[in-house]
Amino acid sequence: MSLRLNISGVRKSYNGKPVLNACSFSFDRNGVYVLTGSNGSGKSTLLRICALIESPDNGEVIYFSGNNIISKDILLRRRITLVLPGIGLFNTTVFNNAAYGLKIRGGKNKETERKVNNALKFVGLIHKKNHNALTLSSGEIQRLGIARAMAIEPEMLFLDEPTASIDNENTEIVENIILNMKKEGRSKTIIATHDMLQAGRLGDCMLLMDEGKIIKV
Amino acid sequence: MESIIEGFKKAFSLIFGLDAELLGIIFLSLRVSGTALLIVSIIGLPLSALISLKKFPARGLFISIMNTLMGLPPVVVGLFVYMMLSRSGPIGFMGLLYTPSAMIIAQTILAFPIAVSLCHSAIISVNPIIKQASMTLGATSLQTSVTIIKEARYGIMSGMIAAFGRVMAEVGAILIVGGNIAGYTRVMTTTIALETDKGNFELAIALGIILLTISLAINLLLHFVQRKGALPVNR
């Protein structure tokens, strides 16, 4: 049963400055949601809260499987993932980076290897699997971030500004990866971007954020 | 000048002739400092991980105390350990004074704050995004902590090497608690001090050369570890 996410009245402030202001929405359809809005509109904070990396000050973040509410424990956290804007690479090989999620789940070696190799092939990094991840270019880092998320086969994937710091060529590659994932129906994807044209190219459902809430669908 | 040149000549003949007394002194130095470092690793590393990753009352005070103790004068440590181990001291009944064990205790006390402070610095210097990335990929809090410590491994190794370098070159504390007994508690630094006092420079120079060589090796290793830890920074 596919995951659904409902957020209601979510508020979050940092140092007294409100970032999310009674934000509500239901992510219940399959496909790609694109969250747009200017810098500081609260997109990244909303993604971190949805991905259960941060807690809201107020409001509710509820995951459903069918009509059942799922408790926000480690088992749920392992069904979703967020690719951060800076990725957060570990100082080890490209392969070990992509295998991290499976290894901490106690995945079997052969199965892990197969899944990781597939994910690296999907993003065009298989030829660099034995390189240290810290030697990759910005575009390759973004692709590795996606491969690392894909390897764990999340039911819900959050991508925070996946092309913000990369050149046009790599932006096209990353967009194609996302479109291919969409075509294969791999996961429900929620992307935050400030690029309206990109939002149009990738999204099935466009959401506009302003002053800490989703104002337009 | 001639006596210095003569001293160097004899020193090299001692080194290349693998003089038994010289080898015994070197091995004891390595054994005492190595054991002290092992004890520090077993107790200090988990402690530095704890103070780096967990918040608890008086954590800041503990870190400040450790930082202050990094500059502990060895003779003060020697005095403290001496008082503890002397016959009238609280653990005098164990009969450890003037034994290699007493020297290990003194060096452990000296190395401990250095290792804990430097390892703590290494762990808290890990980019916070590593913790977030680990969590987004489904790690438990223990797995996240292990991941952060792994990322700090080069800094941790540097801290341990620095602590080893400090205790290997130390003389004050082990002279007080070890007593510099020939063939039993005499190590490189205490021998250099004694032989220089006696005007017997050959052995002192030979040990000086070896101590410098070990120090160079430690620093080369430190440089290598730090270079490896400072790979391109596209995180």
Image: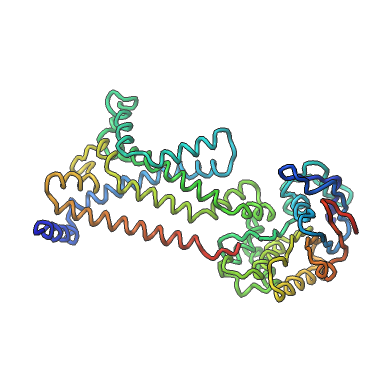
Of the pair B189 and A43, the residue shown nearer to us:
A43
Q: Is residue A203 left or right of residue B130?
A: right
For the N terminus of chain B, the image quarter is bottom left
Residue at image point 52% right, 53% down: B152
- Find residue B136 and report its image quarter: bottom right
Residue A68: percent from left, percent from top: 86, 47
In the depicted structure, whether residue B134 falls above or below residue A173: above
Residue at image point 75% right, 61% down: A159
Q: Is residue A81 visible?
A: yes
Residue A186: percent from left, percent from top: 79, 65
Residue B103: percent from left, percent from top: 30, 39
For the C terminus of chain B, the image quarter is bottom right
- Find residue A82 and report its image quarter: bottom right
Residue B185: percent from left, percent from top: 23, 41
Residue at image point 82% right, 47% down: A61
Q: List the single residue furthest toward the top.
A: B88
Q: Is residue A69 visible?
A: no
